[in-house]
Image: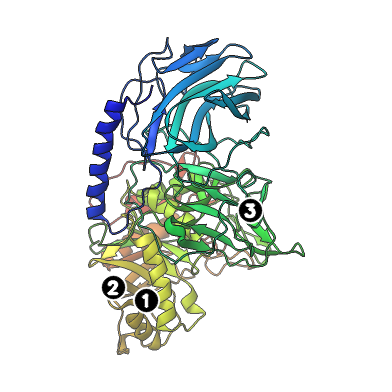
Amino acid sequence: FFFSKQNLKYFEKLVIGCILLHSLMSSFLYVKLLFLTVVTLSSHAVLAHDNRLFNFHFNAFDAAGPNAECHQCNIRNHHTGFTGAGFADFERKGAWIEFTVDVPETKTTNLLLVRYSAGNSDRPVDVIIDGQPIGSLMFLKTENWNAWMNEMIPFESRNGSFKVRLEANESSGPNIDMILLFESALPTQVITSSPLPQVPNPPLSPQSPLPLAPPKNSPSTMPNLITSPPGPTIKPVAPTYPPTEIPLYSVILEPGKSLQPGAYTYSPSGKYKFGMAENGDLRLYGPNNALIWQAFTEGAVRAYMQQDGNFLTRLPNKKSNWKTATSRNPGAKLILDDSGQAAIWHKNTKIWLAGIPSGEYDEPPNSSLEYPLRGAFYYAWYPETWTVNGKRVFFRPVLGNDYSNNDPVVQQAHVDALDYIHVDVAIASWWGIDQKLDRARITNLLDKSVATNVKWSVYHEMERHENNSPEIIREDLSYLKKWFTWHPSWAHIDGRPVIFVYNEGSCGVPKRWNEASNSEWYVVLKTFPGYKYCEFQPDHWHEYGPAYDVVHVKGQSFAVSPGFWRADMQNPRLSRVSESVFRENVREMVESNEDWQLITTFNEWGEGTAVESAYDWGGSERNNGIYMEALHDIHHRDDKVEHRSFWT
């Protein structure tokens, strides 16, 4: 089951070579956690995730193997979901499995991960090292015998040869699928006789080569491991995109649980930690104690993961001074993964995130788009805006007039629908840094668009309200570049990321945006009277006017709208356009050959301007409705896309 000394020396040399090669390619290298030992029952070696350099498996499922002893247990394979060719099945109380570990003298280990299934009952297990009991763990019940979870067991650092035994002490014990040992990286926290909290882990994608979630380091069991002041604010090197594997993660908080000042949780590799500083500020640290993110919640005395999915902090007077605004997501949990991201996790999706982006902008990630281009204004602010000034929207989208942009099903349906109506650039409404769950929602849309023709930009909405200086605009652009524009699904023209701006009218607007963008962005401003005569000109102009069925700015853009009836208005500003008129308008837009051919809008339900499928205009689970079908049939591309629907 374990490395022989001869093999370990060989692989140490290979590991050293890999590290040296990596250090030549990166100015920052931090390998804190080295995978030492894997115990499982499968048949071949695969490259494992992150600092787990190699993963060895054996093919026998009828015997424990030469370096393991199974007492009153059997190696079986009659359940599913295990990672190798079998698993250890304890038969009765007192059954145990024991592994002989051989750790080089130059290294130490103090972390043990056990992947297990407990069926429908909690199953306590004694952990014994070299004959000395170090504690008892309660392996909580899993959904069934085909469901698996992981548990981390810290112990005093040691090296050389020693034995690790897991022994059932009250019942037949759990099934054991895999055991991992890691090099010492965290301060030792010896387990006690009291059970450690254990919780299910969110499922991984079927594409993940390692079908296991990471250990959990509960803040209640590791209360004051790190209390030193924060180090310099240094952004660790982000992994390249797209990732080849889903990062392993630790669960920070389950629903209904809370954090106290001084409590931290580590990512599985030990590189990152998330918790509440002694002054009440929520913080995420990286290698060398570098501060990556903070919530500025000084004075808070507790942070809560509510049952409804909202994560918030409270002051001594019980008032909240910060929240993620992720309510209406019951069962969501807070996690920390090995990519350096803290996230609210719901339905196998990050609905709020902070930390390190999944990529960095070095050069344009895709080819520049060429005109003419079809754009569609998109709104990722549901379920928050299904009412306007307390009034419910008038129309009934097929996905439901309560759908959420946090829902991965909705995200995928929208991306597929945008692709179906030949949208080249979806323009997502954006209200500023860390507003309306932008990091998670836009990232999810970008990810789901990789396999389509859809690219993304944002509509900078705050320019209409604020006369921001170039310095403030530059902060917004830096944020967008940091989090999104490196993504292969972000739109680029002339080798520069595209941004749309909803601005009021004055020649000061293009002047400020030219200065802020410094020719590094492709800026598309909204027209205003006299825009042609401004000394400073952006890269392009457009018009947004959904209260008119057609808005044509010759030489710039052509926009079509299906109607305008805001939820708080007694009468529509633009009654719903008939199918024949809308088709004629779309045909006129395509024949205009304008650079920007715009749809106002795809899903602005509050103002009643959406072309998204709705029962009110012929949409159903099998029909996209009159507006989407018109946009599908009449377009500027040469490609032909078969009829399909996305709303089931």
> Is label 1 in contact with label 3 (beta carbons under 8 Å)?
no
Mark 3: few, some, or many residues within 10 Å (few <14, many ≥20)?
many
Is 321 situated left or right of 627 in this image?
right
> 93 or 130, which is in the foreground?
130
**In the rendered image, the vertical position of residue 210 relative to residue 412, given as above or below:** above
Q: Relative to residue 243, is residue 176 depicted above or below?
A: above
Q: Residues within 10 Å of mark 1 (few under 14, many from 20)?
A: many
Amino acid type for the residue under numbered disc 2: Glu
Residue for point 46% across, 48% down? 411
Tag 2, which secondary structure? loop
Which residue has dot 1 on it? 525
Disc 1 + disc 2, Cβ < 8 Å: no
The Cα–Cα distance between marks 1 and 3, rounded to whole angstroms, is 36 Å
Could you classify mark 2 by the number of other residues whose Cα lies within 10 Å: few (under 14), some (14-19), or many (20 or more)?
some
The foreground one among 160 and 646 is 160
Between marks 1 and 3 in the image, the one whose residue lies nearer the viewer: 3
Q: Which mark is residue 310?
A: 3
Residue 326 visible in the snapshot? yes
- Residue pointed to by mark 2: 520
